[in-house]
Every structure is written in C-alpha cells, then in structure tokens.
Image (spheres, grey):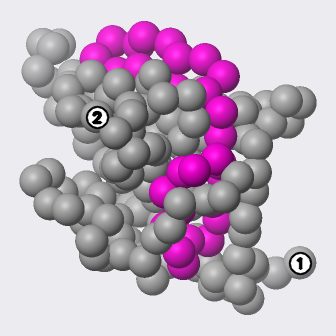
Amino acid sequence: MADEQKQQLFKEAMGNYPTGVTVVTATAQNGEPVGLTVNSFASVSLDPLLILWSIDHKVSTINEFTGGGHFAVHILAGNQQDVCMTFATKGVDRFSTCDWSFSPEHNLPVIKGAFAVLQCRTFKTVEAGDHTIVIGEVADIQIDTEKDPMLYHRRHFASIPAEFYTK
C-alpha cells in the first residue's frame, strides 16, 4: 500500500473516532495569550496527575507551548463550538471573541464557560514524527458539573446530556 493511500485511510479512521475537544492556552514571553484547538488529548497518570496532548511542528506558537513551562487545557462545553472553531482558525485574534482572563494561580489565559480547565506544569515533551507530545502535570482543576462536554465525531459537534446515562 502506498504511503499516500495509508495516510488517507489513517485520516479517515481517525476522523471517525469520537473525541472530546479542547483548547490549550499559554502565556507568551511578551505576556500575550496564545491558544489553539486540540483533540489529541488524553489522561496519562493519577499519581502524579498527568495528561498529554500533541502539537504540530508547523504551529507558529510551538515554542510558547513546548518551552513556556505552563499551559491550560480547556475541555470545552457542548455550547462552545464558536470557541473551538475560532481557536482552530489561523490569522484571527482568537482571544477577542471569547470571555477570558489570566488565572491568579499561574498567570495562564483561562477561557470562561468551559466544562473543565486543567492548569498544568510542563512535565516532559517528546518528539514524535511531525508533532511534539506535551505531557503536563495538573496543578489546578476547575470543573462545572452543570455543563456537558463537547464531542467531535465525523466532522460534527455534539454533547451528550448527563441524564442520557443510566446508573
């Protein structure tokens, strides 16, 4: 099988795998907020509390995320599709379209309205092909259990209300 064909099949398979949606933010050295939409997010460990996400080497703000020491992961709420799309768009002022503030704990840009926000210290970075895997140690957690998290599947957004699940 040719590499191009494998890549296309890989994209098809991964695009049909349901994921949560996150926006990762950090503070640049000049004090400006930076952020991007990320769906390559997963938990790693409970002791210590570790998560991971990956960033493409072509992203213009990669150094702010891999070398800044801290970042925040926003697990988006089901009603935050506009935030997701804005932070996935190049060439726009991403922070001008949402309500956010710097956190007092770590001076990280925190977007209001998320299902959960994990403020992290960079634990380790690992080069992996055309991406860098960023592993973070969770230092602070905020969660709004009144909200439902956003899901992404087959290029569509959704959320599943808590009452859908039976106990």
Question: On screen, 152 above or below 167?
Answer: above
Q: Is residue 108 magenta?
A: yes
Q: CA distance from mark 1 to mark 2?
A: 43 Å
| Left or right, 161 with reference to 36 | right
Q: State the residue at coordinates (56%, 28%).
A: 69
Instruction: Name the residue at the front extreme.
Output: 30
Any part of residue 85 in sight: no
Q: Which mark is residue 114?
A: none
Q: Residues within 10 Å of mark 1 (few under 14, many from 20)?
A: few
Looking at the picture, tell me which residue is in the foreground, 71 or 77: 71
| Left or right, 60 with reference to 70 | left
The residue carrying mark 1 is 167
Where does the N terminus fall, quadrant-wise? Answer: top left
Any part of residue 50 in sight: yes
Question: On screen, 73 above or below 9?
Answer: below
Q: Residue 104: x and y, percent? A: 66, 58
| Left or right, 56 with reference to 106 | left
Region rendered in magenta: 106-134
Q: State the residue at coordinates (54%, 78%).
A: 113
Q: State the residue at coordinates (26%, 42%).
A: 12
Q: Which mark is residue 61?
A: 2
Kind of residue sitting beneath label 1: Lys
| Left or right, 98 with reference to 57 | right
Q: Residue 20: x and y, percent? A: 51, 57
Q: Residue 93: x and y, percent? A: 20, 62
Kind of residue sitting beneath label 2: Thr
SS for callout 2: loop
